[in-house]
Amino acid sequence: MRATPFQRTRKIYPLTSVRFFWAFYVVFHHTAKIFLPVFTTGMFNRVPPSYLDGLLFWVPASLSFFFVLSGYVLSVVYLRDGKPVDKRKFWAARFARIYPLFFVTLVLDTPPLLFVKIHRNGLVLGLVKTAGVFGAHLLMLHGWYLQRLSGIDDANWSLSAETFFYLCFPAIGVLLWKLRGIWLWAVALGLYVGGQMLVFSVRSFPLVNPPFPLLHLSTFALGILLARWQALQQDDREAKPVGAWPTYGVLVLAVAGIMLSVKLAVTAAGHTQLFTGLLAPVFVGIIWALSSTDTPVSRLLCTSWLVALGNASFALYLIHFPMLHLFEYFHWETRPMLYPAYLVLCVGLSVLSFYYFETPARLWLLRRFHSRALETVEEALSSQ
């Protein structure tokens, strides 16, 4: 039996809330050392500096959680009935969800790059170089050559990867959804090991850096396989319902896995692997634990205000860099006391963006495309 939109959304609510916490973690990773000198002066005498640095500033650099979650949610929505994906409706829904705010933040964050390019290269060449970077961002190609195409809202490289996933999803999603039994587990293991071997083998190539979208495709695919395995479990009438304690155990193991991986973050090789899917099994465990059964933890994450913050996580991710550059323009980042104001402003603008810009823009575009979205609001948000 296919899950109803309401049932699917109830599974997505806890994951939507977790999106906010991880997005906030990423914002902290990008900004704390800029605003707070305390993180660069060695005040944490009781904690090894390398460990603290890894925990606070390198582990959140791994966006693998978002990539696994994206594959999972898209599969729950579009593959549950086993039919081919309607490419037109799927791509229209994805464009309507991510592009409006992406374009606005792209425009807002272009002036700092333009000023730098003009200062370094003169007016004409500076305009040309900025136009090249801007055009690559418009086409979502910047993640493929980020060494030369960075400088505009640098956090949005992940959307270049997501766009690549969306192009692949109608094909690889349907293919992976046919797997069952031992083949599902074998392919999952092969994708994880093969993906990490690929990352390790290309790390010496100067043109292939960690944001390179192809390096993250296996992580996205693991989210698809998680959704497939859950669907098979739900369709199996002899399968026992998942209890609360197994989910708690998986969550504890996931946290332990993150803590143990921190030591890897302080090495160049370890940082690259963390950035490109090493923690994918940990994130698979978190998503499974929060979506497989109703527990006090999942109910807490369904609280309306947490879900609202989760709804705003995409905007928070895109808005925090333009706001950081605004603070830097006025030299406000030199005042640590303004850091809470910066964070509150970013979160507040993100919530306003979701309710008064992103959602209206998404619905307007879907009407223009004459497409009815299969995704509920939370599903649309969680799968970008």
Image: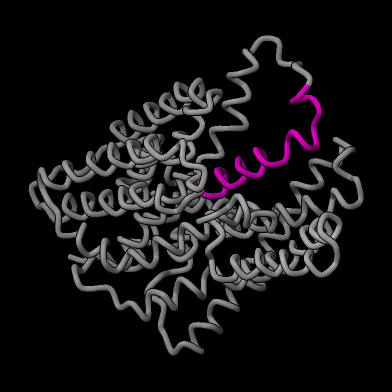
**Main SS type for the magenta part?**
helix
Magenta part of the protein: which range? 18-40
Q: How many marks?
A: 0
Name the quadrant containing residue 305. bottom right
Q: Nearer the viewer, residue 164 or 39?
A: 164
Q: Nearer the viewer, residue 241 or 375?
A: 375
In the picture provided, is 137 more to the left or to the right than 127? left
> Magenta stretch: residue 19 in it?
yes
Residue at x-position 20% and y-position 69%: 81
Residue at x-position 46% and y-position 28%: 258
Image x and y of residue 343, in percent: 74, 46
Residue at x-position 54% and y-position 70%: 139
The residue at the far left in this view is 238
Q: Is residue 35 above or below residue 256?
A: below
> Magenta stretch: residue 294 in it?
no
Q: Nearer the viewer, residue 209 or 156?
A: 209
The residue at the far right in this view is 330
Q: Is residue 238 above or below residue 256?
A: below
Name the quarter where the N terminus is drawn. Answer: bottom left
Residue at x-position 54% and y-position 76%: 362
Image x and y of residue 98, in percent: 54, 68
Q: Is residue 15 above or below residue 87?
A: above
Image x and y of residue 107, in percent: 72, 69
Image x and y of residue 379, in percent: 43, 63
Q: Nearer the viewer, residue 271 or 297?
A: 271
Q: How is the image coloured?
A: one colour
In the picture provided, is 319 more to the left or to the right than 255? right
